Structures are given as structure tokens and as C-alpha cells.
Image (cartoon, rainbow, N blue to C red):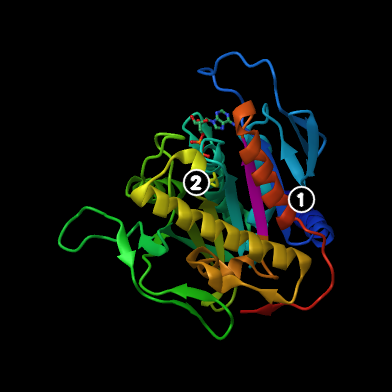
Amino acid sequence: LRHKERSLDDKRREALNKILDIKGCIRVFSRVRPFLPTDKQRIHQPISVESEKIVVRSGGSRKEFEFDKVFPQESLQEDVFAEVEPIIRSALDGHNVCILAYGQTGTGKTYTMEGITESPGIIPRVLQELFNLSSLDSSSSFTFSISMLEVYLGSIWDLLAPRPSSRKYTASRCNLNIQTDSKGSVEIDGLTEVEISNFTKAKWWYHKGRRVRSTSWTNVNETSSRSHCLTRISIYRYGDTLGRKAEASKLWMVDLGGSERLLKTGATGQTLDEGRAINLSLSALGDVIAALRRKKGHVPYRNSKLTQVLKDSLGDKSKVLMVVHVSPYEEDVGETTCSCTFAKRARAAECNRELSEE
Ligand code: ADP
């Protein structure tokens, strides 16, 4: 049975590599949030899905946005994970991977990434899958560790840092440098990394990090998060013979801060600063992804902490998957158009020029 599973595994891996070769290393999906039970009855639906396109209708105009994949309102967490699953194999094969949830606050980014107890999202499914797949791989053995950080107002906060002389954990500001070593691998000095030996421990640490994440308030959504929350799984692959650390790869899962424009949120003071910081880093992320997808000469990683942290996982040899979330509401059509335009830029046509890093 184990042998059969292995050969099935190999076939799937081959199929995946073909898909990734054809479509390039950056894929952009969209997910439309369903109406919630608390919503009033909606008659006009400005957003529709036509195969892999989102169609936005507003004031007599009709705009179409194409994606690599669109998840309509009725899609399930399983449907989303089915598209994500192949790149988990890629991470175990040694590639750096980055999964990003983008969109206006309230459109379902956290639902997609984390999910709810009855319907878990990408992060718990990825953690489970890593342990499942690694136990099936007879040619190598793996260890995993977790780190969590928040990029807030341009600073990095370590969400798993133990507080000295206390058993409590708290977000601790990470003033240390982001360094890139000679192989181009990014290191964040001082960031806590905890080894996770099974799924239960992995979930425990993830929830610990989530609890210390700082949040602020705006009037778009009471619990709108004004920071980016990044979970990193470091994967160490040991070969058969020497048992030394042979290969390390990173798998980032990123719940980005809300992309809404600031005027709409009515933000002032600190919340306005938070919103500005989010918008700047999101546009820096868009610039990096657009440059990578176009294979354009210059990749502007340095313009934000977010892109500096993710530099070695957004690059040419990594696999990137971004899910752009959109609202089903008429009043959000402007934001939806902005999110889809962001995605369109990120999906800009590829050409064959050499990349250089800043
Ligand atoms: P965001 O992280 O973008 O601010 P949330 O993930 O918090 O948005 O989603 C807002 C609300 O909508 C939450 O109550 C969430 O449970 C619900 N929700 C989002 N997406 C879905 C979905 N696909 N199915 C069911 N409920 C969803």
C-alpha cells in the first residue's frame, strides 16, 4: 500500500510541476465572500463569476477581471485547499512558498487562512498536510518549526517571543535586522522559532501567536486588523545517509491587513497611520509581484518591511499564491474594483527579461 501511495505521490508531483511550469511561479486566485445569515435580503448582486472571471457591474458599466482561478460564493474550504495542496508538496521538495490573503476588511481573508472550528482554513490544513505527507515520504525525514510575526506600522513584532521571568507570552518588538545571507536566504535576527513535532503542538503554537496579535478598530469592521500577520513554517529535510540538515525551505502563510482606502474607514490619528502603513506595504507588495510576474529587470523589495521579510519566498525560485478576496455588496463595488485591479497588475503578462534585485 505504501509503495502504491508513493507512486501516486510521484505522479501528482509530476503533474504539479507541469502546471507550475506552464503558469509560472505566481498564481492569483479570487474568492467571493458569500452573503452572511445576518445580511438583509439582497436583490441586486453586482458581482458574478463567469468561469475564471469576476464580472463587476456598477452604474451601467461592466468590467471583467480574469484570474488563474475564481472561487464563487458557494465554494468550500476544501475547494480552496485542493488548489493549495500541490504547493505544500513543493515546499517539502525544497521550494520556498508564500500564500497570501489579500482584500478589503471583512471579505474573508481570515476565514480563508484560518477558518473556523467547523470549517478549518488553509493554515490548519497545511499544518495537518505537512505531517501527513512527511510521514509518507520514505526517502527523507523532516522536522518543522513555526515562527509568527506581525508587521505593524513598519515594525516587526515577534508573536511567539517568551516574556522574560514570566510564563506569559507577549508580542515583542523585533528591532533586529533583516539580513540576507550569501545564498540569498532571508534571516530575521532574534525571531523565535519553535520546533513542532506534531499537528496538535503546531495548532497550539499557532493559536498562541494569534492571541497576542495586536488589533485596532475602525468603523468598517469592528475587529478590522490593521497589521499583516505572517506565519512561517521552516521545513528541514534530512537526507537518508548523514542525517544532517540537508535542505531548508520556508512556507509563509500571510493574512494581509485590509486593503480598503482610508477615506471610507473614517480613520483618524493612530488608525489613520496604521491604514497608511498597510496601504504603502500592500502597494510595495503589488510592485514586487508585478515585477516578478513580468520578469522585469528590477524587483523593488526594499520599499517595505513586508517585502523585505518575504524576499526569498517571493522570488523566481519560489511558488507564490495570492487569494484576492472580494465583497458581494453593492456598496463595496469601488473597493472590489480596486482589489481586482491590484490582482490584474499582479498578473501582468510575462516577458523574458532577466531579473535583478534591489
Ligand atoms: P477579513 O479577515 O477579510 O477581515 P473575515 O475572515 O473576518 O474577513 O470574514 C468576515 C466575516 O465573514 C466572518 O464572520 C467570517 O466568518 C465570514 N466569512 C468570510 N468568508 C466566509 C465564507 N467563505 N463562508 C462563510 N463565512 C465567511
* Circle 1 or circle 2, nearest the eye: 2
Dot 2 crowding, Cα within 10 Å, few <14, some 14–19, many 20+: some
Residue bearing mark 2: 262
Label 1–label 2 contact, CB within 8 A: no
Q: Position of residue 24 (x, y in %)?
A: 78, 61
Q: Assign a secondary structure to mark 1.
A: helix
Which structural element holds mark 2?
helix
Q: Which residues are magenta?
A: 320-326
Q: Position of residue 247 (x, y in %)?
A: 58, 73
Q: CA distance from mark 1 to mark 2?
A: 49 Å
13 w.r.t. 36: above or below = below
Amino acid type of disc 1? Leu
Residue 176: horizontal and vertical position, in percent? 36, 75
Q: Nearer the viewer, residue 54 or 21?
A: 54
Residue 301's image quarter? Answer: bottom right
Instruction: Report the disc number at residue 354.
Output: none
Which residue carries the number 1 mark? 8
Q: Is residue 171 left or right of residue 138?
A: left
* Viewer-closest of 178 and 251: 178
